[in-house]
Image (cartoon, grey):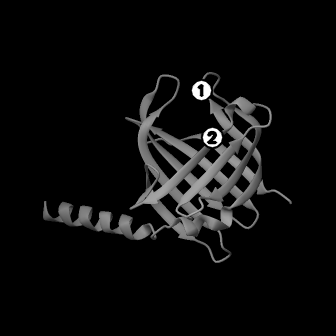
Amino acid sequence: MKNILFATAFFLLCLSVKAQSLQVKDLSNSVGSWEGKLTYLDYSTGKPYTMSANIKISLTKNKNGYIMGYEYPNEPQANSKDTTYIVNKLFGKDKIVEFKKTVDGGYSLVTEIAGEDGNDNKKAILRHTYLLKNKTFSIVKDVKFEGTDKWIKRNEYLLNRAEN
């Protein structure tokens, strides 16, 4: 029993060390306009569907919020804007699982939250992975339904920095 408690405590310590402290300013290199595509898994057909997608990223005036404006040129009714704040170890409502800066100014941010997904709104863990490289930005949403160990790629934004 002692070994199980020690192993659990060690595992939790490793998880907390794995996520560097994150502040909105750490995401500032992603500010700007991004153009590309969104590919998502259509649960009805079981096949991927790809469409044009753009994201405009900015920070709030006080630099405490991260604003993402989603634009879909062929489906403008789906356009939306989200402002996310980092409080404690949460990116909005999502738990920050991992954050790593890269030497070239990029970063990798992984978040998870319990939620629902699928056509029948099954309980699941929703994981988002944000990856900023030199001139590319991607966001992947993976889903793991309750009672399974398998992650399913639900959607993926693949974007390039827009030329101004």
Work out which residue is located at the far right of the displayed protein and give it: 164
Q: Is residue 147 left or right of residue 121?
A: left
Q: Is residue 140 above or below residue 60?
A: above
Residue that badge 1 annotates: 43
Q: Quadrant of residue 57?
A: bottom right
Which residue is more in the foreground, 134 or 74? 74
Left or right of residue 144, residue 152 in this image = right
The number of numbered badges drawn on the structure is 2
Near mark 2 (Cα within 10 A), the count class, few <14, some 14-19 or many ≥20, is many
- Looking at the image, residue 66 sits to the left or right of residue 136; the answer is left
135 over 75 or under it: above or below: below
**In percent of the image, x 81 and y 56: which residue is there?**
162
Residue drawn at x 68%, y 32% is: 78
Q: Earlier in the sequence, mark 1 or mark 2?
A: 1
Local secondary structure at mark 1? loop
- Separation of marks 1 and 2 at Cα, in angstroms: 11 Å
Residue 155's disc number: 2
User: Contact, CB < 8 Å: mark 1 with mark 2?
Assistant: no
Q: Quadrant of the N terminus?
A: bottom left
Q: Residue 135: x and y, percent?
A: 76, 63
Q: Amino acid at mark 2?
A: Asn
Secondary element under disc 2, as helix, strand or loop, is strand
The residue located at (57%, 45%) in the rendering is: 141
